[in-house]
Image (cartoon, rainbow, N blue to C red):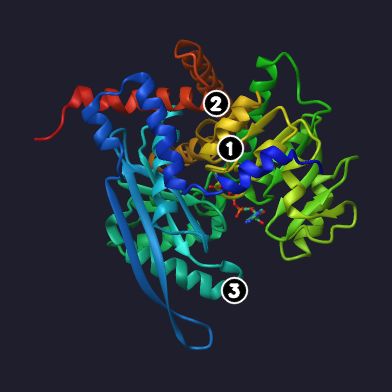
Amino acid sequence: MKINPAKKMKVIKKNQKMGMYENVMQQFNRAADLMELNPSVRKILAIPNTEIVVNFPVKRDDGTVEIFKGYRVQHNNALGPYKGGLRYHETVDIDAARALATWMTWKTSLAGLPYGGGKGGVQINPKLYTNSELERITRRFTYALGDNIGPEHDIPAPDVNTTPQMMAWIADTYMSTKSTSERSKHAHVVTGKPVGAGGLEGRDRATGFGVVIALKEWASHKNTTLKGKKYILQGIGNVGYWASIFMQENGAILVGVQDASGSIYNAEGINPDNLFTYMTDNRGFIKDFAHAEALPNEFFFGLECDIVIPAALGNQINEDNAYEIKAEVIAEGANGPVDGAANDILLERNIDIIPDIFCNSGGVIASYFEWLQNRNGEMWTMEEVLEKLESKMKISFKKLLKASVKYNTDWRTAAFIEAISRVEQAYLQRGIFP
Ligand code: NAD
């Protein structure tokens, strides 16, 4: 791997990593300046509405009690109830929850949904707990949040390390706190549930599917297709796995994967189905997969490829690796995977970035369909879901392109301008109480 020494020097000097909230606020401020956002609305949107931190006790299997820290940040609800995932990870803290909640406001607005933005989670490594402990942690966290969540107020969903099963536990716990006659009206307190517990056909694959729709739109904008394009994938969980399945359907070739256990590479291609079968028997990890070579993590983003799909955590592409990227496009499956410094380096290098608030919006769009399905007592089919999702994403991409031409700006700033404008309108039309 060749590294330009001059650039490397710069990296070492400036290697002050950006916090996630600092990243989202830099994106917001750039858009707000360019669109000349109303100054009063700007003050409101520059800070979350509500920040909830709960410390709650849970009994471990051995009878000892452990205290857990949970977060829920509700950024803005001018367009509708707060909406956004719950994450179980050691990196969950108030900065991460704030940043992710803020991105949700812009994501739901850009997608044209009647939602605001929220996000939260528990600071925990879930791999260290048994299934029954995770059930108690999830139920007790839900109970601690109480009426700070609710089907018409704040609607959580899955995120990193949270599963449809956990969403079913949240729904069940929340519903159990209501009177018997009211219970059934509350199933849509959470989305991303298993299909048998009120979930939506296709919600599992919606984010990954949406990432590939975004890439297909990018390809058609560039007069090309995904067929034969080589790509690398960071994170092969819900988003990454389904993205790899739909990329395969479109003839793209997976050449590198990184997850929490390490990195692997095969220039001839890695079959996602084979990899996933291997992972199922390997505690969900890619490490030691026989049909690819192991690679030090620091070389991952510098691999030869056409497309990078980061689908793990935030700030993964930063000054340390932005100069090494060979791809022509980055499709942000994860939230905030490219930090502010890397964003500018990549734009300067003419690498396209399909911004997270558009690229991974398939998940929240399908969550909206699930919420509608529960609210209206309907049952949607997989075909209906994927068709409606595709059409919504295509509309968002058109809006983003139009704003980028109108304001002569990059796609991320354009997406933010579109999203912020909708919320600005709501405030300007309603006024500020009292
Ligand atoms: P997941 O828990 O299903 O998978 C996470 C993946 O990231 C796993 O493969 C894990 O091994 C990997 N990972 C964790 N730490 C890593 C590290 N340090 N280096 C490399 N890989 C690492 O999570 P998910 O639901 O697929 O979410 C992934 C990203 O997509 C997150 O940023 C999330 O906010 C975003 N997102 C998820 C959804 C959704 O519907 N699940 C929707 C929109 C955005």
Q: Position of residue 66 (x, y in %)?
A: 44, 80
Is the residue 225 above or below the residue 67 in the image?
A: above
Pick whichever, 123 or 159, lies toward us. 123
* Disc 3 C-beta below 8 A from ligand 1: no
Cα separation between marks 3 and 2: 37 Å
The residue where tag 2 is placed is 393
Return the mark for residue 128.
Answer: 3
Residue 31 occupies which quadrant of the picture? top left
Q: Disc 2 or disc 1, which is closer to the eye?
A: 1
In the foreground, 78 or 300: 300
Q: Residues within 10 Å of mark 1 (few under 14, many from 20)?
A: many
Helix, strand, or loop for circle 1?
helix
Q: Position of residue 2 (x, y in %)?
A: 80, 41
Q: Residue at x 75, y 17 (%)?
A: 224
Mark 2 element type: helix
Q: Is residue 407 in sight in this rendering?
A: yes
Q: Which residue is mark 1?
A: 342
Q: Earlier in the sequence, mark 1 or mark 3?
A: 3
Q: Amino acid at mark 2?
A: Met
Badge number at residue 65: none
C-alpha separation, residue under disc 1 versus residue under disc 3: 33 Å
